[in-house]
Amino acid sequence: MQKIGKKLRILRNLHDYTQESVAFQLGISQKTYSRLEKDESPLDTALIDCVAQLYKISKLVLFRFFETDEKVFIQKIAETNGVYNANGSVVQHQGFTEAERSVLFEQIKQQQQVIQHLMSELNKLQRN
């Protein structure tokens, strides 16, 4: 499983939340939440439930996100407009705002540009 803190930061940024607002909604201090994002503190069961409720996703989808490469997960959510197939069951996200979809598509576009650039550089190196 990849680091959970980075995934928490991605979820927070996708929803355009501040650390303070997430911490408040989870009932913890901003400093405690910051430690979660830095993987300095473990995410306990009660907080997992709260995080899933905050982002309006099931715990199954949240765990799948923690286990999946974040770029793949973000792309799947963007491609399906919030619907994510987790272990054969379809889970409907409450829906992304236009701004959230825009951020997701922009991230995908940037990743595709990076891939194209790297492929170009690789081709140049292979020719030499």
Image: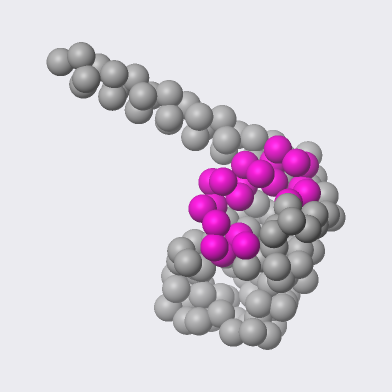
Which residue lies most toward the top here? 127
Q: In this view, does 84 lie above or below 51?
A: above
Q: How many labels does the image show?
A: 0
Which residue lies most toward the front here? 88
Q: Is the magenta stretch mostly helix, strand or loop?
A: helix
**Residue 86 lies in magenta, yes or no?**
no
Residue at 76% in and 67% down: 58
Q: Is residue 118 above or below residue 71?
A: above
Give x and y (percent) for residue 102: 69, 36
Give x and y (percent) for residue 13: 61, 54
Can residue 63 be seen here? The reply is yes
Q: Which of 89 and 101 is in front in this view?
A: 89
Q: What stretch is highlighted in magenta?
A: 64-84
Q: Which of 99 and 53 is in front in this view?
A: 53
Residue at 44% in and 70% down: 38
Q: Quadrant of the C terminus?
A: top left
Give x and y (percent) for residue 75: 62, 42
Residue at 51% in and 53% down: 69
Answer left or right for 54 relative to 73: right
Residue at 62% in and 62% down: 64
Can residue 93 be seen here? The reply is no
Q: Is residue 17 above or below residue 105?
A: below
- Scheme of colours in the image: one colour
Quadrant in the rendering for residue 59: bottom right
Give x and y (percent) for residue 105: 64, 35
Answer left or right for 125 relative to 112: left
**Residue 76 lies in magenta, yes or no?**
yes
Q: In this view, does 115 lie above or below 49?
A: above
